[in-house]
């Protein structure tokens, strides 16, 4: 387990829980085209249509528009491939609003103190982002076509991004000036850990579960048509058409289609298992064969692979000790649409299987007979120990009511109908020093930095006029 362990979009078996927002930092590696265009796209426009021109907050003589909040929310959900429920979305929306308010205050304070963002540095980042955007869409022509669809010109887009980069630079430079990172030794970090255990996250409780997953499958004719469409789309790319062009025309994933199929950077454990296996088996530049995932047929192209870094700048490892890899990829999704009859058929089967389990039929036997789960840890349905934070609130609430040996009700998510058997449980507990020693220096430095930062921002807020209009 890791000190900095965060919630992730979880596997199709367990549902999904989204991590905390991270709006303040600007990373050209992970934004560029997404930040440049997708926030202004039709999908984002649909999400914020009812709030257009609405004022979310007044900050001194400036305002935060609801459209700004919705843009950042849309980008966060897109980058994290998250689909939160309404309560989680409202929480995210308020967190984003608070961060936008803080940003207004910090930028205003930076200007007051005479902090500058040199034009040369701003322009360098903007031009780098524009070049990368064109590369991701495959050509200058595809880039121009995308701008036309968004009712933008290149100059307008460049100016919008220039303003955003300048604001981010001003904020970052002032924060670095006012809240400098303090160097912490290993001995100091360990002493701090022992003196302030309440400031460190707990190791979440864990459950060991076995799973029967019954997906909703279309009829054979619909399935064959979807596969044929995926094969045809791949053939177009193999014959020389740009991936981005084909994705924009045929992909059934509207969010990524508007970015030429770009999914951003993905890590293990955040996607449908079948999709993930294909993704991590491909090499950069390789165009994969159509692969059937939980949501349809995918054509995947890996753009680049990278190793995640920890706070110390060293390569991170996953829970098995292997290098933690992130992959920048794009895809085309061809959905095999299911009917109401398909859903009803899968639900009825799940209810029958659950009834058999409740009567005492061996769960492993039922797994072998009925389950279609394709995850990496699923021998005879056993998922091993999973953090309770891995599960969606609905799934977590259902598992919380179970005693060891109990079988859950039928739980529905995007992957289908799920039945869990709880086989063991470990309660939440504090981390032991030896479990987090390698990350402790960075963790303590981060805690101390955030404490100073929060105190400083609290002072800015105390001197400001802030009026929340809506959240």
Image (cartoon, helix red, strand yellow):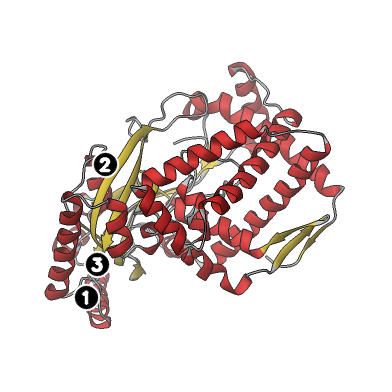
How far apart are the two marked residues, 1 and 3, measured between alpha carbons?
10 Å
- The answer to which of 215 and 144 lies nearer the viewer is 144
Determine which residue is flagged by label 2: 280
Side of 371 relative to 435 (left or right): left
Gap between marks 2 and 3, in whole Å? 23 Å
Task: State the count of labels.
Answer: 3
Report the quarter where the N terminus lies. top left
Q: At numbered mark 1, what does the secondary structure look like: helix, strand or loop?
A: helix
Closer to the chain start, of discs 1 and 3, is: 3
Residue 442 higher or lower than 93, as above or below: above
Can residue 27 be spotted in the picture? no
Q: Between label 2 and label 3, give the one nearer the viewer.
A: 2
- Asked if residue 317 can be seen in this view, the reply is yes
Q: Which mark is residue 143?
A: none
* Labelled pair 1, 3 in contact (Cβ < 8 Å): no
In percent of the image, x 44 and y 40: which residue is there? Answer: 131
Residue topped by disc 3: 215
Q: Which residue is pictured at 59% across the width and 40% down the height?
A: 25
Q: Is residue 453 left or right of residue 304?
A: right
Q: Earlier in the sequence, mark 2 or mark 3?
A: 3
| Corner quadrant of residue 341 | bottom left
Farthest-out residue, bottom: 341
Does 193 sit above or below residue 160?
above
The quadrant of the picture occupied by the C terminus is bottom right
Counting other residues with Cα less than 10 Å from the Cα at mark 2, is it few (<14), some (14-19), or many (20 or more)? Answer: some
Q: Residue at x 64, y 46 (%)?
A: 163
Residue 7 position in % (x across, y down):
48, 48
* Dot 3: element: loop
Residue that label 1 marks: 349
Q: Quadrant of residue 336?
A: bottom left
Counting from the top left corner in percent of width and height, residue 227 is at: 15, 64
Where's residue 78, x and y in %?
45, 55
């Amino acid at each position: 387990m890791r000190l900095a362990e965060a919630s992730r979009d979880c596997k199709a078996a367990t549902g999904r829980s989204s991590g905390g927002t991270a709006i303040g930092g600007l990373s050209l590696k992970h934004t560029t085209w997404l930040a440049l265009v997708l926030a202004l796209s039709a999908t984002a426009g649909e999400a914020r249509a009812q709030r257009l021109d609405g004022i979310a907050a007044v900050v001194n003589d400036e305002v935060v528009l609801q459209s700004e909040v919705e843009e950042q929310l849309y980008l966060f959900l897109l980058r994290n491939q998250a689909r939160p429920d309404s309560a989680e979305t409202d929480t995210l929306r308020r967190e984003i609003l608070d961060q936008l308010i803080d940003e207004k205050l910090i930028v205003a304070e930076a200007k007051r103190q005479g902090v500058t963002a040199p034009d040369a540095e701003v322009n360098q980042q903007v031009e780098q982002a524009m070049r990368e955007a064109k590369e991701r869409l495959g050509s200058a022509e595809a880039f121009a076509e995308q701008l036309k669809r968004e009712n933008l010109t290149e100059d307008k887009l460049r100016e919008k991004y220039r303003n955003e980069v300048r604001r981010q630079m001003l904020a970052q430079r002032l924060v670095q000036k006012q809240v400098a990172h303090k160097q912490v030794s290993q001995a100091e970090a360990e002493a701090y850990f022992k003196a302030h255990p309440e400031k460190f996250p707990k190791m979440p409780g864990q459950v060991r579960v076995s799973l029967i997953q019954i997906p909703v499958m279309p009829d054979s004719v619909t399935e064959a048509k979807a596969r044929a469409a995926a094969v045809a789309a791949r053939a177009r790319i193999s014959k020389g058409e740009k991936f981005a062009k084909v994705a924009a025309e045929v992909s059934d994933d509207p969010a990524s289609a508007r970015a030429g199929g770009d999914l951003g950077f993905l890590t293990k454990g955040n996607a449908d298992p079948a999709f993930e296996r294909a993704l991590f088996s491909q090499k950069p530049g390789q165009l994969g064969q159509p692969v059937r995932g939980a949501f349809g047929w995918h054509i995947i192209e890996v753009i680049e692979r990278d190793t995640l870094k920890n706070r110390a700048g060293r390569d991170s490892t996953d829970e098995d000790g292997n290098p933690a890899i992130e992959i920048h990829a794009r895809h085309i999704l061809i959905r095999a649409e299911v009917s109401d009859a398909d859903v009803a058929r899968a639900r009825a089967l799940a209810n029958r299987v659950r009834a058999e389990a409740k009567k005492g039929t061996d769960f492993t036997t039922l797994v072998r007979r009925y389950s279609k789960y394709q995850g990496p840890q699923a021998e005879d349905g056993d998922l091993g120990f999973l953090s309770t934070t891995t599960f969606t609130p609905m799934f977590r609430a259902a598992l919380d009511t179970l005693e060891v040996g109990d079988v859950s009700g039928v739980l529905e998510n995007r992957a289908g109908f799920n039945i869990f058997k709880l086989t063991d449980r470990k309660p939440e507990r504090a981390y032991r020093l030896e479990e987090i020693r390698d990350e402790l220096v960075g963790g303590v430095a981060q805690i101390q930095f955030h404490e100073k930062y929060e105190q400083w921002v609290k002072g800015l807020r105390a001197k400001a006029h802030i009026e929340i209009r809506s959240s």
